[in-house]
Amino acid sequence: MWSLTLGAALANVGCSVSLAVFSAGFNFPMSLTFLHFAFTVAFYRLLAACGAFEPQSLPHAEAFKVAGFGVGSIGFMNISLHLNSVGFYQITKLAIVPCTLLAQALLHDVHASRRVKLSLLLLLLGLAVATVSDVQLNAPGLVLGLLAVATTTIFQIWQGSKQKELELSATQLQAAVAIWQVPQALAAAIALENLCAGLPPALRSEEPGECRTAVGFAQQAANGGGGDGGGGARTLALVVLTCFVALGTNVSSFCLIGRTSAITFQVVG
């Protein structure tokens, strides 16, 4: 139904932009991502309890694999943004489109027409000219950028192919995957944002000798401290708001990719 597809596209654009705006003041993206996935799981548990949809389980290895690429996509993209210039980060986002075309051809024998490829080439060139500037490279940033492109490409392809392969709706697939993303995102948050000894200097926003953690930030916010998001009540409100917006982003992305393709999703985004 074209109206549902259009609605998913518009919702995804709106939610993605809103999430970027509302999350801009937080320096702990993986901790925030953990809360988003936990909120998503709670939301789907509530829907299932109300009989809104019938949950379906996936083989543990399959669910863990899909979830891991989803969390990896978010994690590598965020770290890449810290290590690289904004211009190079934009290039990595644009690179997902040709990588998706290549991966679909190699993994699923799905080939885009020459007309589609030419249209995408013109679109990417236009976006590159309009948005890419100040490109600076470094070895760690390049590696993390490549990992970000690879994990995002595979995850977005799986968002669509697994729905067809396993005969699941977008809601059923996301509900089955999100429950595995919670512990994975928590592990990443602990490793990257709560263990100062293991955090590379390039990823730290504080001065040398200072250690700022997500737990410390949460305690400061709870006590009404200034922190990244302002007072405690305002910070809590922003976190809850990002949970709702992230839920909308996830729901619309699974729906849009399931009804169209990963390429369409990238073009819309």
Image (spheres, grey):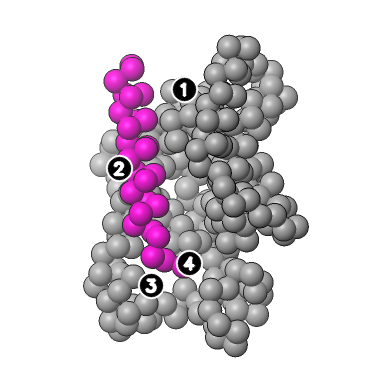
For the question of whether residue 73 can be seen, the reply is: no
Q: Looking at the figure, which quarter contains the C terminus?
A: top left
Q: Residue at x 26, y 64 (%)?
A: 237
Mark 1 packing: few (<14 Cα in 10 Å), some, or many (20+)?
few
The mark that comes first in sequence, 1 or 2, is 2
State yes or no: discs 1 and 2 in contact (Cβ < 8 Å): no
Q: Looking at the figure, which quarter contains the N terminus?
A: top left
Circle 4 sits on which residue? 28
Mark 3 packing: few (<14 Cα in 10 Å), some, or many (20+)?
some
Specify the segment rendered in magenta: 1-28
Real-space Cα separation, disc 4 to disc 3, in angstroms? 10 Å
Q: Nearer the viewer, mark 1 or mark 2?
A: 1
Residue 41: percent from left, percent from top: 40, 50
**Amino acid type, residue under disc 1 in the picture:** Thr
The mark that comes first in sequence, 4 or 3, is 4
Real-space Cα separation, disc 1 to disc 4, in angstroms? 33 Å
Q: Which of marks 4 and 3 is in front?
A: 3
**Amino acid type, residue under disc 3 in the picture:** Asp
Circle 2 sits on which residue? 47
What element does badge 4 sit on? loop
Residue 154 or residue 65, whichever sits in front: 154
Is residue 259 depicted above or below 150 in this figure? above
